[in-house]
Image (tube, rainbow, N blue to C red):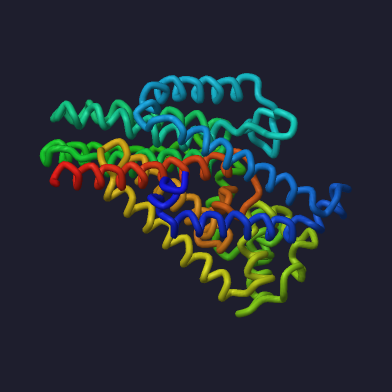
Amino acid sequence: MKKKIAKMDLLLLFLIILYSVLGCIMIFSASSVLTVLKQGVASNYYFIRQCAILVISVIAAIIVTRFPLKSYKIISCFLMILIGASLVGLLLAGKITNGTKGWYELGFFNFQPAEFAKSIIIIYLAYSYEDIVKKKETRAFIYFIPLFFAEVIALLVLKQPDLGSAIIIGVLAILIFFAVPMPKKTRLRANLIIFIVAVIGVLGCVAFKDKIFTSYQLSRFSFLAPCSEEKRNERLGYQVCNGYIAIKNGGLFGLGFGNSTQKYLYLPEAHTDFIFPIIVEELGLVTGILIILGYIIILLQILKIAKNAPDVSMSLIAYGTCCYLALHTLVNLLGVLGLMPLTGVPLPFFSYGGSFAINAIVMIGITEKIAVESQNKKLRDKIIKL
């Protein structure tokens, strides 16, 4: 075990542990008022639950990474079918919660198929494209077959409706597609097809927006000037505007841990989507900037693992994990800062949530396993040379 840990990316491991611990602490602070004043439970309610979720996540990561990476290929197609069926099941018989059919309520834990779909799609695409690359396929349409199934999952998520997760799944699949090694002519044809489909898709969304999106989803695209008199009375404008107030209150060094004023029910999602403004309010803008820099380091370390991976599938899994975390971080931060529509996407390792936390930590575990495999390959290559 010690030898495996020594071969891991220790900087990445340290930052993930640091962010997860700090996330639990900030969830306790951000949710302590809500739990007592509105929900009538103990102030540490969400803190305890998040700690339990982290323990479950680590156990899940250990179990998953005990299997050889090649074994993921065998079950990836089965998991795609399973996640597709679970999404269809939600649409047909799911319970509407907060305007969406997004969860299966399992008591202590709410199973959210859209979150598991992201990690499953990364693994499915990685092994599907590895087979295609090994065959040295030159027909462009063959490369679009795995992408098609991934985008079907994105459409099922959009129908819940969960616009944020649907966008992340759709973009994630396309980013992995662009990372697949192809012959030059095939790549040019594939890129042209992607461009044409993207233009048609955007024009279709504009022309038939009322049929594709719900009125609530369309309202999210009106995100500019959230603190104007008109927007302040709307739910989304109210949230973003109070997020601004939290950031302004914090200044450079913050009001001190536990001293946020905006968590006093001004920010209804303080421990989930809007945890970053609470962090800045209590710990300051300097801490907020350091956290963003930490995310950049995490992503760069994962990209390094992807670059050094022994084969195509491992490289695409690590690259997909990087895109997965980057998209969540960007969409959350840009949303709470009013720079793009607010979509309800959690901030990795800080926001409260079960399904996302489990998937994120499992994917980090798999990425670290890839780092270990890379080190093992280097050692084998050295032995062969000797």
Count the marks: 0
| Residue 325 drawn above or below residue 177 | below
Q: Position of residue 299 (x, y in %)?
A: 41, 56
324 and 216: which is toward the camera:
324
Seen in the image, is 7 located left or right of residue 270?
left
Q: Name the residue: 50% across, 40% down.
A: 362
Answer left or right for 138 relative to 103.
left
Q: Quadrant of residue 106?
A: top right
Find the residue positioned furthest to the front. 386
Asked whether, in this view, residue 74 is left or right of residue 288, the answer is left
Report if residue 92 is visible in the image: yes
Instruction: Answer above or below: position of 321 versus 140.
Output: below
Q: Position of residue 157 (x, y in %)?
A: 52, 32
Q: Is residue 211 visible?
A: no
Please name the residue shown 61% across and 19% down the image. 92
- When the figure is inspected, residue 246 is found, relative to residue 107, above or below; the finding is below
Task: State the image coordinates of residue 215 (x, y, percent, origin top left).
Answer: 60, 41
x, y percent for residue 139: 15, 28
Residue at (72% x, 44% y) in the render: 49
At x 67%, y 71%, the residue is: 281
Q: Nearer the viewer, residue 346 or 239?
A: 346
Residue that extends furthest to the left in the rendered view of this protein: 185
Quarter-of-image position of residue 4: top left
Q: Please determine whether, in this image, residue 337 is positioned above or below residue 152.
A: below
